[in-house]
Amino acid sequence: MAVHKGVTRWLVAGVIISTASIALTACGGASGTPDTIAGVGPAELVEPTEPITITYAGAAYAVDQIQPVIDAFEAEHPNITVEYESVPFDDFNSVLAARLTNASDAIDVFDVDMPRTDAYVARGWLADLTQTFPELVDSVDPGSLEAATVDDKVVTMPYQTSTNIMYYNKTLLDAAGIATPSADPADRLTWETVVEDATRAQAAGAQYGLIFDQIDRYYQLEPLAISAGGGPGASGDGNLDPEVANDGWVKAFEWYGSLFENGLSPRGVAVAETPNMFAAGQTAYYVGGPWWGGQFIAEAGLDFGVTAFPAFEGGEASTPTGGWSLGLNPQATPDKANAGAIFMKFMGLDNGGYAQYLSALAVPPSNLDGGVKFYDSDVFKDPRFAGVVDLMKSELANTSTLRLQTVGYVEFEDVMTKTFSDIINGTDTAEALKSAAADLTEAWAKFK
Amino acid sequence: MIIRRVGRGLLTVVAILVSLLFLLPVLWLVASTFRSSTETFASSSPLNWNVLWPKEFTLVNLESAVNSGFMTALSNSLLVAVVTVIVGLGISAAAAFALAVIPFRGRTVTFSIVVLSFLVPFEAIAIPLSRSFSDWGLTNTLIALILPGLGNGLAVFTMRQFFLGVPHSLSEAAHLDGANWFRVFWSVYLPLTRPALIGAGLILFLFQWQAYLWPILVTSRQELDLAPVAIAKAFGAFTTDYGRVFAETAILAIIPAIVLLALQRYFVTSVASTGSKE
Amino acid sequence: MSTTMQRAQRHTSVARRNTLAAIAFLAPTAILIIVLRIVPAISAVRDSTHSGLPGSLAEPEFVGFDVFARLFASDSFWQSVRQTLFFNVLVNPIQIFLALVLAVLLTRNLPASGLWRTLIFLPSAVPLAGSTIVWGIALRPDGPVNGMLELLDIPRQPWFTSPDQVILALIVLASWIGIGYWMMFLIAGLNDIPTVYYEAARIDGAGALRTFFSVTLPMLRRPLLFVLVADTVANFVLFAPIQILTNGGPEKQSNLLMYDIFHTSYELSDPYTASAELVVLLLIMIAIVVVQFRLLGSSDGEE
């Protein structure tokens, strides 16, 4: 007994000592920054004369996918070596946070998820590139440019964007006697029609009527709110006043929740599992990215077609967009910043950018010239994909809507993903959205 | 006699049924290794025999695992785990011996620190610790991967508990024969507590076998990826190779199981064979 | 007189020798534990008194107990504490009870018991992310487990998708992983019990149940204390299944403390709030572990 009383006593003592150590808190002196670009990208890019190695951390591509691009770059710039580090997407933020601070093994160039740009600027993670890439303005699509610009400053090099379409299973539609929709953006279906037809298809044998690829993600669900007149989710100074419980949002998500209530969409499914459900031929309508095309085409028995991302009756058409940019470490040394910027220019601007070196492209590059190669890819020549190229071009030019631009995007996405999950699982929509608004107000207080 | 035999038969049936219950999800995993992920998801609902048996066998998933460099990651994981078990077992057993057998002042304090150390969730301190490792110049080294697995309070704790069960008379007898502490440790305690060593070895092994967050924080080169990191990389921004994930997960699960099966016979030699216990 | 002094002298020299031996035996582990666990934990405690914008590279500012004050004023924090306790009050007894039952069963000289042990242990060797994906699919509302329930005329259950059942689903998942693992330690402990005690009990005419309570349990006390403490800690710090499957939902019902710590620190880049929550979690765990030592520790280690 005695000894264990001892253990108890010492555990308690340990707690007290730890607590006392709070009192000893002293700020670790700010480490000197001897030789950095201090947050401003180089005004002029000079081909290095000495060998230099830069580190590029990315979450968009695996090593073997990006390697041809890096090989091409190193061939053109023999003095620069690029070390690519692929980081799993879910952990990318933490790795950046840990590695941008330290000089010895710091990251020089890194992928930036477009909607997080404002947050990264606020964190001091992004160098100002306005004077580095003046030609950016005319070279990329408008959405990408908007995503790269914060307070009239260019802070990233956008290199790829995205759009969404709706796939349908022709076999299942035929069985229900539903006419095949067209891929012409002018023939955009309404969500009301889609639900009606999906219900019929399900009655005629489809296991699921309608599935969204990114089941609980704001990226794909924002257009529902916009089409229902609810706006992107926040307004006011810096987009920090939550607007997620207005009539438009309630209408959009009561509709979305009913898909699950009525069994058109399955509950309890993870985002990454959904393409397999369409590929298996069990799903009548599937809203998703064109990047699943490769997988669907590989299923010989799958007879599918594509049509535009629907809108609500009488509502405006809106489609998801956005992708990846490159950021430059604001604490990089001038030499590394110079070499890093040369690499960023190669990725986003030179001769249409990185896209020409990739074997298979999943999404359109931001660079307008680079897009040619994307739209020419073999995937889109499959007869089942007829009309998709014009459709994607039209959506990117006319209906694509960026995600909310706010310094509080990380918290916003977090709260909204959880809210969408709750709505899917049957929580009352109005209640769920109201509680989301309250959570956002609490989470955003620190930014105001 | 017959009743006892029937009872034993019944218990065996119970053991088999329970084992099957635990095995079913693993069987599903193995089945999913040998079929396309499209088929995996198509056959998981509604319930049918194809949940556990592929309609069309394919080796595509294993091939894609091998081609994606999983074998390098697997051998990294094996290397890191084996070194951790050997070194970690040595130093943890020594520490546990001191805490259980050698009388000295400060024993309870030391033991309390050990207990406190395994209450701290490693994930919660990984980020600041990774900064220290980077300051010490250890990023992208095997040492960085191995070190955090070595100081394992749980392994010390479990061995201490078993060492306490070894009769003091044995160590006193050895002392009278002129043996020093190390001899007592090595030739009296260790041989008698093999099951505890296996248990502690499991703790050390699985810590590294499951390691995911820490490797991401301290290594950035693909050639140093551990197996769980390699698996996570199957989930890309635009592609998800579930088949590969299942194949790699199944491989990762089966290796420790085989090792444990081989170690089963050591579960019988223990303190009990000395005939007395305190 | 002189013999007492000699004895006392010998006693001190023995004590000194013992202390030196103990230092030698303990040093490597002690240094590793202090440098790699205790020091970072103390610095985490320090972090909890600081605050700054998420992910900001600027030096954090000292704010005293403000972070705690904000935490204690938040309903969702208390909900998280409540659910953490609720989960643990259920999962730990269930796991330990079943692990003990299986350990007893598989030490009864059944044919091929090594094989059954290995099969039951197998789940704990599956990487956590893998077992989470498997159970996520198995427990889907239209998944195979509900299919089996239907065969038995039991209605389909919502499992992870219902605020009322998400903890239950997590218990199923955690137990599938944990039971076989803790069972191995209890089997090692059971094998340590000399058969003479069982023979004595048999001669006394004790039945199976009485033998279990009068011989097995008392003799198993030390390994059981380990399993009790270690299992409790393991379940308090479990978060991967929540991160992969539920994100703390539905309706925040699975927002357990450790998941929230991980989420706040890694996904929201706010180490300060996360550290404050960590301090709370550590205090809760220490309190419980202290009680467990009091319950099962009794005369351990007495010379």
Image (cartoon, helix red, strand yellow):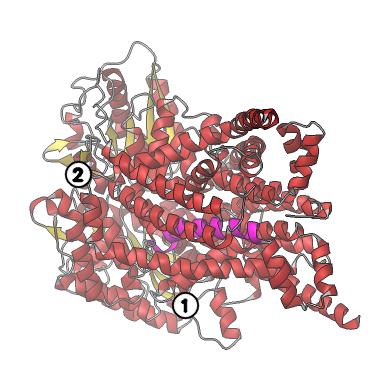
Residue interval drawn in magenta:
C221-247
Helix, strand, or loop for circle 2?
loop
The disc label shown at residue A206, or none: 1
Q: Residue furthest front?
A: C1
Q: Residue furthest right?
A: B1
Q: Is residue C73 magenta?
A: no
Task: Indicate the quadrant where residue C20 lies.
Answer: top right
- Amino acid type, callout 2: Val
Which residue lies at the image location 44% right of the left edge and 75% below the top edge?
C165
Q: Is residue C225 magenta?
A: yes
Where residue B206 appears, as percent x and y from the top left, is: 60, 48
B6 and C199: which is toward the camera: C199
Mark 2 to mark 1: distance in Å?
A: 58 Å
Task: Indicate the quadrant where residue A257 lies.
Answer: bottom left
Q: Residues within 10 Å of mark 2 (few under 14, many from 20)?
A: some
Q: Residues within 10 Å of mark 1 (few under 14, many from 20)?
A: many
Q: Quadrant of the N terminus of chain A?
A: bottom right
- Amino acid type, callout 1: Ala
A395 and C157: which is toward the camera: C157
Residue B51 appears left or right of B272: left
Which residue does the numbered mark 2 point to in the structure image? Answer: C63
Which residue lies at the image location 58% right of the left edge and 57% below the top edge?
C297
Task: Indicate the quadrant where residue A255 lies.
Answer: bottom left
Q: Looking at the magenta stretch, what is its main secondary structure?
A: helix
